[in-house]
């Protein structure tokens, strides 16, 4: 047999993404902050791109998470209810680490039991002190230590104190901010002129502080909800209740303005690149809005009643309805947040398969957390008991499923949840 080398011609196919397509895919995954960073880099290199900062929100334009909290916005005070199980687990763990003196621990546990889902205290300190047979200053001293627990704002006695703690933490609290927080009714009404006179600053300074306040979390306890974004920032989408349904929109106050300047003196290639960036950003925003609207329309019940009302939903279903590839939907929701009346949620966590032919897994996790939050402190429910309670809705829930969901929600087993007074 001949061992001489032979030349052979073969044909192969290889998929290679060009630079433009790679960038488009990256922008689909980018949240508002990531988009801003990318555009800043492009504007620094391309003279044909002009970047403007996100617009200042109009006076009185609050994010949906402020509803039922700020005076004048849909009823004022938050609902009176027990704090969620994940929040309580987090707080009790912090108390175990910080409160080594038995009397301090007793006070701390009493204050923890007074927490509401918002993360605020639902009972006056004087009442707690009287029930414990202690002096008010002793309870106040423990409260100050509890207010150091993350996220900042927990154990606040009212909205003003919750916001003050957060502003102090990020270094934006000053005398003028203090005046604004002491007059939240004027801020809610948009009376910037009067606030400026009271604070002794210009209306422009009042508006600057309004934007800082607007970005804070009025209900830090909601960061422990099943769908919640920890440490809320400017959301990508906002959803508000309107007559007959829900309105979903891009959060324009998180999006920079982008303009193409044709007579900037650059090359033709630079101008073409600038127009390409503009088209990609417009496509990203359009796709994000389409996907967000489809998801939130399907989960309208959860927007009204909370995560416990989530229905089973897959990315394949959303992709088919929008005539998109499933991978496109996956990229869009990867880091996308939406501000709702219940707090800020991750879009990706709204996808959930059905359990036992019944409700969505995410809805079951929310119901599990509620059952644990409402259980007697001295007689917590076992995993078997929780499985039976969850199965009352028609779903077959195994004990091991309850244990798995507890771990996901960072809820300890029953013997560690037992608390006596």
Image (cartoon, grey):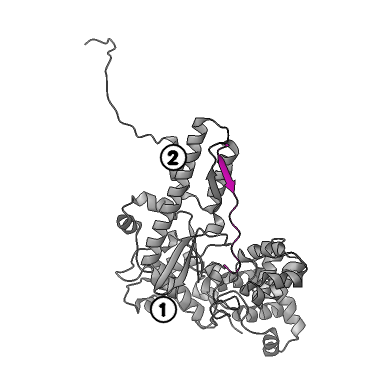
The mark found on residue 22 in the picture is 2
Pick whichever of labels 1 and 2 is earlier in the sequence. 2
Question: Is any part of residue 90 visible from this angle?
Answer: yes
Q: In this view, does 133 lie to the left or right of 416?
A: right
* Label tally: 2
Res 213 → quadrant? bottom right
Mark 1–mark 2 Cα distance, whole angstroms, equals 51 Å
Q: Which residue lies furthest to the left in this view?
A: 1
Residue at the spot x=43%, y=59% of the render?
A: 348
Secondary structure mostly seen in magenta is loop
Res 293 → quadrant? bottom left
Q: Where is residue 316 in the image (x, y as percent from the top left)?
A: 32, 56
Question: Is any part of residue 101 visible from this angle?
Answer: no
Q: Which of marks 1 and 2 is in front?
A: 2
Q: Position of residue 56 (x, y in %)?
A: 61, 59
Q: In this view, does 122 lie above or below 359?
A: below
Q: In this view, does 247 lie to the left or right of 314?
A: right
Q: In this view, does 15 lie above or below 139?
A: above
Q: Mark 1 points at which residue?
A: 385
Residue at the spot x=64%, y=82% of the render?
A: 110
Q: Do the residues labelled 1 and 2 touch (CB within 8 Å)?
A: no
Q: Where is residue 335 in the image (x, y as percent from the top left)?
A: 48, 54
Magenta segment includes 260: no
Q: Which of 224 and 90 is in front in this view?
A: 224
Q: What stretch is highlighted in magenta?
A: 47-61
Q: In this view, does 373 lie to the left or right of 205?
A: left
Residue at the spot x=26%, y=17% of the render?
A: 8
Q: How crowded is mark 2: few (under 14 residues within 10 Å), some or many (20 or more)?
A: few
């Amino acid at each position: 047999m001949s061992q001489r080398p032979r030349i052979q011609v073969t044909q192969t196919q290889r998929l290679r993404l060009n630079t433009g397509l790679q960038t488009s895919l990256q922008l689909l995954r980018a949240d508002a902050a990531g988009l801003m960073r990318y555009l800043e880099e492009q504007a620094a290199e391309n003279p044909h791109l002009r970047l403007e900062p996100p617009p200042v929100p109009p006076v009185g334009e609050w994010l949906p998470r402020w509803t039922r909290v700020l005076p004048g916005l849909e009823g004022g005070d938050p609902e009176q209810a027990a704090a969620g199980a994940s929040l309580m687990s987090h707080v009790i763990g912090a108390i175990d680490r910080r409160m080594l003196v038995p009397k301090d621990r007793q006070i701390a546990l009493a204050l923890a039991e007074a927490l509401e889902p918002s993360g605020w205290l639902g009972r006056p300190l004087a009442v707690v002190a009287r029930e414990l047979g202690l002096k008010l200053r002793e309870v106040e001293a423990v409260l100050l230590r509890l207010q150091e627990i993350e996220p900042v704002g927990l154990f606040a006695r009212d909205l003003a104190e919750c916001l003050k703690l957060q502003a102090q933490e990020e270094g934006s609290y000053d005398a003028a901010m203090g005046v604004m927080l002491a007059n939240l009714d004027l801020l809610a009404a948009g009376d910037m002129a009067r606030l400026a006179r009271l604070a002794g600053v210009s209306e422009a300074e009042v508006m600057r502080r309004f934007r800082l306040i607007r970005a804070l979390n009025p209900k830090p306890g909601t960061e422990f909800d099943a769908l919640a974004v920890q440490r809320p920032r400017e959301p990508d989408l906002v959803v508000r209740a309107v007559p007959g349904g829900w309105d979903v929109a891009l959060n324009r106050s998180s999006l920079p303005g982008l303009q193409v300047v044709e007579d900037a003196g650059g090359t033709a290639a630079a101008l073409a690149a600038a127009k390409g960036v503009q088209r990609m950003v417009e496509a990203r925003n359009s796709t994000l809005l389409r996907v967000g609207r489809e998801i939130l329309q399907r989960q309208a019940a959860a927007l009204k009643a909370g995560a416990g009302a989530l229905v089973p939903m897959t990315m394949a279903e959303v992709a088919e309805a929008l005539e998109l590839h499933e991978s496109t939907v996956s990229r869009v929701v990867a880091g996308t947040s939406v501000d709702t009346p219940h707090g800020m949620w991750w879009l990706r966590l709204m996808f959930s398969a059905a359990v036992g032919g019944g409700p969505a897994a995410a809805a079951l996790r929310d119901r599990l957390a509620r059952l644990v939050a409402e259980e007697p402190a001295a007689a917590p429910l076992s995993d078997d008991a929780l499985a039976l309670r969850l199965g009352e809705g028609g779903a077959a829930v195994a004990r091991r499923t309850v244990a798995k969901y507890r771990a996901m929600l960072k809820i300890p087993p029953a013997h560690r949840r037992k608390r006596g007074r």
